[in-house]
Image (cartoon, grey):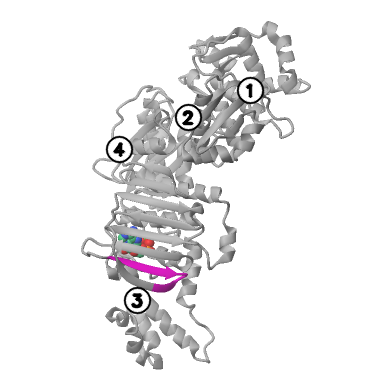
Amino acid sequence: MYNFCQNEGIQRFFEGSPLFLRLPEILFQESLTEFKTYRLLITFEALMPENTIALLPEHVANQIAAGEVVQRPASVVKELLENAIDAGATHIRLLLKDAGKTLIQVIDNGKGMNPFDARMCFERHATSKISKTEDLFQLHTKGFRGEALASIAAIAQVELKTRHANDSLAQLVSIDGGKFIGQSECQAPLGTSFTVKNLFFNVPARRNFLKSDTVEQKHIIDEVERVAIPHANIHFTITSNGNEILNLPPGNLMQRLKSLLGSYIQKELVPIDETTSFVKVQGYVCLPNAATRSKREQYFFVNNRFVRNPFLNHAIYEAYKELISFQSHPKYFIFLELDPKDIDINIHPTKTEVKFTDDKTVYMLLVSSIKRALGKANAGPTLDFENEMSMDLPLKPGPNAFAAPSVNVNPNYNPFHSQTPQDSPLQKVNRQHWESMFEGFKQEVDTLPSPNQSAMEHLRQESLDFKVFQLNLKYLVTAYNGQVVIIDQQRAHERILYEHFLNAKPDTPIATQQLLFPEQLELSANDFQLVKSLLGEFKQLGFDVEVFGKNAIVVNGTPSDLEESNVKHLLEGILENFKLNTIDSKIEKRDNLCRAIARNSCIKYGKALESGEMKQLLNHLYACENPLYTAGGKVIMMELEAGEIEKFFKR
Ligand code: ADP
Ligand code: MG
């Protein structure tokens, strides 16, 4: 109350007003916050007949604020997870029902709240994280605006159970559409549990705007990933409609990435690590050949907070220039650490945008550290560090500006003259060249009356001057128009099968080969539900699958053109891939299933191929709509242009 009266602005505003005299009365009605009281008074003021302007009642103001903070269930998840992290939790559980539309519950073992805070946290601008302007420039927490809980409570039915270490009993607070229902004592473990039910129940227009459960759940998983990656030391478990869908045990960053994305990710990534007096850059970037068609695995964290920053994103692409094709996107998980005073997070209510006081330095440093990391991994031309320094980095003066480079494999390489003779032609993978090569093949394919049917015909005609050999049981090497073409056999076949399955129509399904001995498979509850939801798609793609009691299926037949003999293995692989793709990117389920089947039934590395088989593979590949990339965006072929071969031997 004392604080309130000290607020000069408000005091002046009310001076002389008859309401001012009633101030103590109002103030003692409830333990109100400064803002609430302010609002209440002005609402009274507005009741005076001669006034036309009124401040919105608080619950309406909160609903409006909620529009900024809460767009969908995923926004609630983000805010609650961040609060749990700020509370120092080491284990955070997220429970969802109907993709968060019916229920979102976050349970943490953090520090909890005392009875006063338990009620107070729902007030707008109620925060324990900042108290004065200067704190805004020293932020070390995720939250600070103090409006998340007030906003969430305005548009849902919220129940908070929380216990602080100093208290023997927990507090139970219920708020319904911004209306305080009650506060009582109860038993509960240390920490906090927020239950958010029926989101937007009182704003039907917004509720109707929500997308399907699949889409909303994906948004939630996205948010979970953004929070879970920079907090690998925290255990997260996520349950959806009673099934555990993610369990992320505590560990280091690489372990977290592996449990989120699959253990394959480790082979694709190289570490980056640079420190200057101004910024510390750490994390992982992918090898050029692991770049994909999707931009999903691109993460920037600034002081452990997920951010978007198109300018820095550009720095990454700059570092990969010449190393990846224009349709490919590098994966990255980059952590920048700066003094909070050098960043301004406070430019967007949902706080994913960030401004730096000196973003050019960060840009330069990113480019050079990625180039160096790729160089060390022999995946790209290494930086000549002296040339790099000549870019005049606008370094802040400091005792230990740039760390000296530890490895410098190719001192002649100049990253700004990529066509100099010092370039290794073998390292160059260039999009224009691929395209021109593909043009050649495409014309050839285009001359076919109907590419799919007559590919074999074409093969027979071409077979006389068409030479191909297998390298390391992995690549097919051939020559075309004076260029050497190297094709990845596994990826090529994966692409062919993918298009084959994708082209199956309801009236022309893939033929089924009945199994001599139908195979019965026991599945996890999750996988069983998944297969059930995909029965129609499986059938169209040539699988004869039936459900068989609780959590079991029987496979009676498989697509007739598949060679895979181990049906159990095949099905498990397909489900695994399907699930991985669901986390990985937003692809439609039939497309996803085609990808998963292709991935699991294609010929693998290590398989020796006969000359006829190789030619058939290449012809089928050239007849594909997109012979350059797998459905997942991996490069299928590389070429060495005649000019480059010439150049190499001129040295
Ligand atoms: P902000 O996080 O911006 O401070 P919120 O509305 O999200 O605002 O939360 C308000 C306050 O409630 C926080 O500052 C914190 O003190 C308290 N709080 C919220 N969630 C938790 C939690 N899980 N554990 C302990 N305290 C919490
Ligand atoms: Mg918060």
The magenta segment is 170-181
Q: Is residue 384 above or below residue 529?
A: above
Q: Residues within 10 Å of mark 1 (few under 14, many from 20)?
A: some
Q: Is mark 3 within 8 Å of ligand 1?
A: no
For discs 1 and 4, the disc positioned in front in the rendered view:
1
Q: Amino acid at mark 3?
A: Thr
Residue on which the image places disc 2: 290
For discs 4 and 3, the disc positioned in front in the rendered view:
3
Query: Tag on residue 33?
Result: 3
| Residue depicted at x 72% and y 22% | 452
Q: Is residue 16 above or below residue 330?
A: below
Q: Amino acid at mark 2?
A: Ala
For discs 2 and 1, the disc positioned in front in the rendered view:
1
Q: Amino acid at mark 1?
A: Gln
Labels 4 and 3: the sequence-earlier one: 3
Q: Residue furthest left?
A: 166
The answer to which of 86 and 571 lies nearer the viewer is: 571
The answer to which of 221 and 376 lies nearer the viewer is: 221
Residue 58, given in percent of the width and then of the height, sits at 45, 75
Labels 2 and 4: the sequence-earlier one: 2
Labels 1 and 4: the sequence-earlier one: 4
